[in-house]
Structures are given as C-alpha cells and as structure tokens.
Amino acid sequence: MRKVRPLLPAILALGLLPATVSTASFADTPAATLPASQMPIGQYNPADSKTWTVAYPQDGPQQIADGITYRAYTQGFPSGTPYGDAAGDHWTLSLDYDWGSDTVLASQDDATNQLARLLTNVPTLAGQAHTLQISAPAGGWNGDIPATGQSVGWAVRIGPFPTKADAAAFVAAGKLGSHVDSAGKTVPYTARVLYDANDGRPSTGPWAVRVVTIDPAKYNLQTTFGGTVANPDTLRQLVGASGAMVGINASDGVQGQYEPGVPAPDGYTGDVQGIQVRGDGIYSEASNGRSALVLNGKDPADPNGAIVPARIGEVSTTMKVTATDPVTHQPDPTTVFGINRPPGYIIGCGFESTTAAEAAAHRYYPCTNKNDLTVIRSEWSTNTPVKSPALTTANGYTQQFELLLDANWVVQKVHTPGDQIPPGQIVLQGLGTSAAWLQKYQATGTRLTPSADILDTPTGKSITNSDLGVVAGGCGPSLLRDGQIYLNVKANGMFGDNGDLNNWSAERHPRTLVGITADGKVQMVTVDGRDANTSIGMSFLETAKLMQWLGAKQALSMGCGGDTALIMNGVLYNNPMDDWGTPNQNSPYERHLPNALVAVKK
C-alpha cells in the first residue's frame, strides 16, 4: 500500500499570463451547410438551418499541437414561441423562501402552500405567480435510479417577462411586496432572475460546445491545485503554474458556509469535495463510491494489475495511522478520515462509517463526525484550520487536539489549533476518540506509521500505482459505460432526501465533461450555459448523448455551473457564467477553483 505522502515538494511559482483576459470566440459563421452529423439534442428540422449543428473548423479538428486537437460546435436558437415539441423559453422570477435562495420544493403541496401565502401577502401578483413542476426526462434513462418523467421538484415562479432586464426591474421596483419571515420580521420577498430553459424542458437552445482531444502518449494528464488548498486559484493560474498547454476545471469545491474562516472568494472553498491524488500523494480523501477519472491506475479487471492510462470508475480511499502501544507493544491503528480539510464536517459524506447515510456519498450534504481524524500539511495553508463554532461541546463535540509531526511522522509536540504549519511538517487533528488516541501518543519522539490505499469500489481491489492520478467528478454522474448511457446519480450522491431523483437530474447548467475514446484519447469538453442568446447549458441526459455523439466510450461529469472553464495557451476559450442574469457578466468571469485537470507535454 502506498503511504500518505509525508512531504510536500516546493510549490511551483505561478506562471505569468497576459494581464488582459482574452476570450476566444467562434470563428465568423460560414455559409450554413447541412452537416453530416447532428448533435442529438434540441429541435432538429432538416429544412431549417437554425437547427443545424455547425462545426468550427468545418473541415475537421484544428491541430493545436502534436497530440492536441480542438473543435467547437454550435446548434439551435432562442425562441419564446413553440417550435417542434418545445413550448418556448422565457425569463421568469423564481421565488426565494425563508430557508434559502431559490430552493426547489419537494412536493406540489409545498409549492401550492407557498403560492397561497405569496398571493395572500401580495394579491397584485395574481395572474403572474404560479407553481411549476420540474420533471425528469420523459423518455427515461439507464442508471441506478430510474427516470421515467416523474416529478423531481416544484417551484413558485412569477412571469413571464419579455427580457432579463424587465424581470430584474420588476424586483427592483418592489413589486414582489413583503412578508413576515420565520423570525417574525417583515422582510421583502426576493426572487432569482431565471431563464426557464434551465428547468430542462424541450428547448430550441442555443448550445455552444468546445472539444479538446488529447493523446496521452504525448501529454501527461494530471491534477493540480496551484497555490494552497485554502486559497484557491483561477483556472488561468492553475494552468500557468503547472506549465500546461490546456486545462479544464475538475472537481466541486465545498460551500463556504460549511468551513468558517476558510476563504471562499466565489462562495466555495478550495477544499475538494471528493478525491484528488497525484503521484506524490493524496491531496483529498474520496467521497467513497463516487465516480472519478483514474489516470495510470491498475486495471481492477486484470489479474496482473495492468496499468490503464485513463479510465472512469468509482473509487474509495482507506487510510490509517498506526502507533505501537507502550504497554502491550502491539500495533495500535486508527482510521484517518480526511486530508487537508477542517475537522468535524465532511461535506458530501461518503466516509468510513457504520451509519449507511454517512457511508454513502451525498453531494453538498453536511455530514459531521464527532471522532474525526484529519491530516493537514503545508499545501493546505500556512496555518491549520479549526473546527466550526457550530460543533459545540454541548452537542457532543470535544475540543480539537493536534500533534505536530516531522516529515518522517515522528511526534514533535502538541500543536495549537490555528497555529502555523512549519514547512515540510505534518499536523494530525482529532476530535472525540481520535483526539484521545492522539493524546495517548503525544510524547515527543513517538513514531507513527501512515498507510493508505486507493480502491476500485465495485471490486474492492487496489488501483494504487506510483504514477497514479485520480480526480473526483463534480456536479454530475458518470455518463457512459462501454459507449452506452448509464447515469449513476445515486452513487454520486445526487438524490433527494428520500433517495429519489431531485431537480439536479433535470436542470440545464454549464458543464465540463471528460470522455475517453475507443483508442484511448482523452476528451476535455465544455458546454456553455446560463446565456439565453449563446448557450443554455445541458442536463445530465443531454451531456450523455453529447459525449456518445462525440465518440466517447466512457464519460464523466466534472465541475459545472460557474466553474466551467477551458484555458488553452493562456487563453480563456469559453464563456463562464455564474448565474442567469448575473450583473457582472459583461466581461469574462473566472472563478477560483479547488483543482484542475491539465495536459503537460511529455
């Protein structure tokens, strides 16, 4: 088993890139010609060129470098009137509720009650406010939770409005009125400006897709987090720091509300929600059972453990640290639950637990662990994180206890939470029984032994290898297996409180995708979204159909939404969007990201 990496090598200095952000747009639209192949989404009419897929360049992929090609595609058009089986897309307002912004409701009764309350408080909205059902794809899909057109959520909407500006002006003018909130205060109603193509119903589009295809024989694919985990960088910085030619956003970050004191410049911290492994160590533990891109891992189906350059599979981590009991002189192992994250909260769950709800992945869900043990190294930041103030002793959480270790895992001293991490050294943080274990072995000079393994979840076999790279997917499931659509939304924690489908299964968002072709090439794909005029984004099923059309045999959803970005040769190629109608979208927007997948010349 490969040991948890004991020492961080020097961090690469950030590469210098042009100060001015430049966005590579599609080439001037050529005279439309009927393409030989059509993206299998949206409304297709052979007699209407607005519905055709147009490729750039038209005569085939552009050679960016030996081993890297690029091609982009557009399709569709915005329409507010019916076309084919699309009813037309419109600007609306999606009502916020007391417990959170733009919360999708679980049932029709919930939506009906919220609508009645709204109309009681603001009767002038009669005729404009209504409930809306969000449904799974009517045609269904193959996956670990069946999708057969069932309801996956409800919302209260106001509108439609002719334009985004009209919807925003309606809110600014105070026409939503006010209500008494759960704290007894009179507060104004708020709502999110939303284009209803977001809900996943049949649409005319448009869509904008960009595809970079990489030959792993000529480029090393690897993960990077740039500077420090606690202070995330933009994709531009991540790609520049690694010396890569091309890179895309990779995993989800953790919502900042769950990690007090950790910088969250775009609402998310640099803590990866799931696994990140490079050849020199584990940087983030797995959310066990979630899908990931595995680079240079052992093939669990091969009895000899042949190395596979790239594949997609479900992975888990098992990590321990062992001391020698001073009385019995026997090994005394204990479980390590996390790497480089604050103790107590395990966002996304999926950790070693006897409780099924904690052992299963559940995206963004805040599981807690009263006996947490985490490893913090200097790539986290200059100082150790501290547990959330919400994890109080009154609720059964002990005080955080820490030991400082040298690079050889020899105890140096008791470490104060929040103090500096000396370069090259390690801090173990414990709560509850893990804190008691650390206290038992706190004597200076005590030698601890770490061990870790990366497992293929379905078989339980080790895939660990000295050149291993693993990076968790993001806000979507695995998409293709052996070229066939398979959406494992449950394994990736994308389900409702009752284990059923939720609104994530239907909604369209910007998407970042990774595909692996039959000849082993790796595809980095971005789908722009949240822009009514250029690209509305795609749902899970639409992305699976897209990757199948692009020739992938395996495919995985990476990060999405405002994270979605593609940098090549220092240029931002796509059009990242934080939200529908976000005011700051007049210029290219680049989020700070927890990590990236990059291609570096061999």
Image (tube, helix red, strand yellow):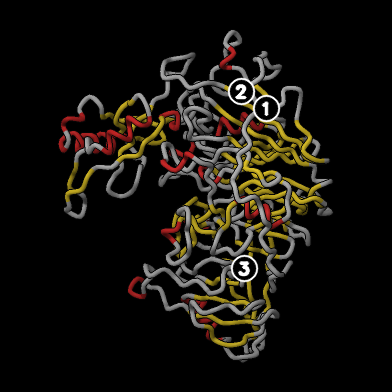
Q: Distance between the residues labelled 1 and 2?
A: 7 Å
Q: Distance between the residues labelled 1 and 3?
A: 40 Å
Q: Disc 3 on helix, strand or loop?
A: loop
575 up-or-down from 325: above or below: above
**Label 1, residues with CA under 10 Å away: few <14, some 14-19, many ≥20:** some
**Label 2, residues with CA under 10 Å away: few <14, some 14-19, many ≥20:** some
Question: 302 and 586: which one is in front?
Answer: 586
Q: Mark 3 points at which residue?
A: 379
N-term-proximal mark, 1 vs 3? 3
In the figure, residue 5 lies in which quadrant? bottom right
In the figure, residue 258 lies in which quadrant? bottom left
Question: What is the three-letter code of the residue carrying label 1?
Answer: Trp
Question: 358 and 411: which one is in front?
Answer: 411
Question: 14 and 303: which one is in front?
Answer: 14
Question: What is the three-letter code of the residue carrying label 2?
Answer: Pro
The residue positioned 49% from the left and 13% from the top of the image is 84
The residue positioned 33% from the left and 48% from the top of the image is 100
Question: 372 and 100: which one is in front?
Answer: 100
101 up-or-down from 438: above or below: above
Quick one: quadrant of the N terminus? bottom right
Whether pointer 1 and pointer 2 mark residues with C-beta atoms closer than 8 Å, the reply is yes
Q: Position of residue 363 (x, y in %)?
A: 49, 50
Residue situated furthest top in the rendering: 47
N-term-proximal mark, 1 vs 2? 2
N-term-proximal mark, 2 vs 3? 2
Q: Mark 2 points at which residue?
A: 40
Whether pointer 2 and pointer 3 mark residues with C-beta atoms closer than 8 Å, the reply is no
The residue positioned 50% from the left and 58% from the top of the image is 269
Q: Name the residue under label 1.
A: 549
Q: Disc 1 on helix, strand or loop?
A: helix
The residue positioned 28% from the left and 29% from the top of the image is 130
* Left or right, residue 147 beside residue 521: left
